[in-house]
Amino acid sequence: MKHDLKIRRSGGGEGVITPFFFAMVLKLLFKYSVDEQSEQ
């Protein structure tokens, strides 16, 4: 819910930061999945 409010408030000013944040999350998820595979 907090993230939704942030995105709504940041109109177009932080529209450039959102893709960066999304890429960071994808990187973390990828790293997580790789770690899980190496554990098996």
Image (cartoon, helix red, strand yellow):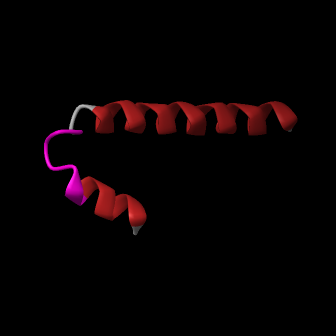
**What is the x, y in percent for residue 37?**
76, 35
**What is the x, y in percent for residue 21?**
40, 36
Looking at the image, residue 24 sits to the left or right of residue 19; the answer is: right
Q: Is residue 16 magenta?
A: no
**What is the x, y in percent for residue 16?**
23, 31
Q: Residue furthest bottom?
A: 1
Q: Image height check: is 4 above or below 26?
A: below
The residue closer to the viewer here, 14 or 28, is 14
Q: Quadrant of residue 35?
A: top right
Is most of the magenta stretch helix, strand or loop? loop
Q: Residue at x 86, y 36 (%)?
A: 39
Q: Image height check: is 23 above or below 2?
A: above
Q: Residue at x 30, y 34 (%)?
A: 17
Q: Is residue 10 magenta?
A: yes
Q: Residue at x 17, y 39 (%)?
A: 13
The residue closer to the viewer here, 19 or 37, is 19
The residue closer to the viewer here, 3 or 24, is 3
Q: Quadrant of residue 8?
A: bottom left
The segment highlighted magenta reads: 8-14
Q: Quadrant of the N terminus?
A: bottom left
